[in-house]
Image (cartoon, rainbow, N blue to C red):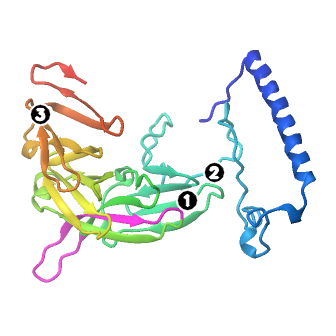
Amino acid sequence: MIISGSVTSLRVERECMRARQFCLVALLAIGLSACGSSADRGPADRVPSDSSSKGPAENGRPERAPHDPPESFTARGAVALPPEAPAGRINLLGDVRDLAVALHRTSAYVASVDRMQTVDLTTGKVVAVARPRAEALGEDDDATEPLVSADGSLVVTPFVTRRPGAGTQSPSMELEVVATMPETGKTAWSTSLTVPQIWAQRDNSTPEAHAVGFAGGNVIVTVYTGYNAATAGIDIATHQVRWTAQNIRTRAVTAEAAVGVDILGGFGPDQLVGADPATGREKWRTEKNIGHTTVESAGPSLVRVRGYAGDGGTRP
């Protein structure tokens, strides 16, 4: 829900003064531009006459002008996300939790168990739909948010899928990673990792998958259940799996390390581990075991860890 705010009288006076200054600057700019003619302009100032010079409104897209950060918000002009976005994520009180949605510039990337939709936030239209190649597994709320690279050049979405058996080969469960181009939603590449068959024998639940971060030329992905876990580094240039680490559930990536917990074969308690994101080689490990561990990013070179130490006390 978007809430409107209020401003103090002091802020109103300040804003009025700023508006008067802006008007003076605008009038000065108009006066300067009126003094020059088209012949006085350089090549960079002239407007080309071809169709590429059309503004956003002329090309059928709403024009977006730069503006100061807002102090209040309204629901007017809101764009609705696809119905798959809140599916399975609304409780009995009507609260929405943990949407599998990533936002970047003027696009929203909405993940569900069997697809990832690219939505143009200026129009509310679904631009493209990317799907895994194999049959998707899981319920509505099993999907996790797509991951957008820091430079905005790639969007990565993980899916848990099932490959049908063929001949003497039995069906298998896989982690399929689909990379799409931003804004257009066009699929760039996809890579699959086989999930060991023993996982299904030990845990009947669908594994949870996350695209965790980019570092060392790789996108780091992780997949896990209550008793099993694995992390992999996929080369974003060759689209090949560069390394895998069994029993490691990774939830934060910095430039120096992919940080997660070693679930110790599902028998825990966990141990915190840092791995080289380029090679997967273990760089460090905590001495003490930690139960019910959560790991999350806290900055470019920091992670925040919370769990229960061996003496029973909580250690953030």
Read off the residue under disc 1.
119
Read off the residue under disc 2.
79
Q: Position of residue 18 (x, y in %)?
A: 78, 29
Q: Nearer the viewer, mark 3 or mark 2?
A: 3
Q: Secondary structure at mark 1?
A: strand
Q: CA distance from mark 3 to mark 2?
A: 46 Å
Q: Position of residue 74 (x, y in %)?
A: 69, 37
Q: Relative to the observer, which residue lies in front, 155 or 312?
A: 155
Labelled disc at residue 286: 3
Q: Residues within 10 Å of mark 2 (few under 14, many from 20)?
A: some
Q: Within the magenta stretch, is there residue 179?
A: yes
Specify the amino acid type for callout 3.
Thr
Q: Is residue 57 left or right of residue 173?
A: right
**Residue 47 in view:** yes
Above-or-below relation of 231 to 129: above
Above-or-below relation of 125 to 311: below
Q: Given contact means CB atoms under 8 Å apart, are the residues at marks 1 and 2 in contact?
A: yes
Q: CA distance from mark 1 to mark 2?
A: 10 Å
Q: Which residues are magenta?
A: 163-183
Q: Position of residue 189 (x, y in %)?
A: 36, 71
Q: Position of residue 211 (x, y in %)?
A: 32, 53
Q: Quadrant of residue 226?
A: top left
Q: Quadrant of residue 216?
A: bottom left
Specify the amino acid type for callout 1.
Val
**Residue 87 in view:** no
Specify the amino acid type for callout 2.
Val
Q: Residues within 10 Å of mark 3 (few under 14, many from 20)?
A: few
Q: Relative to the observer, which residue lies in front, 255 or 81?
A: 255
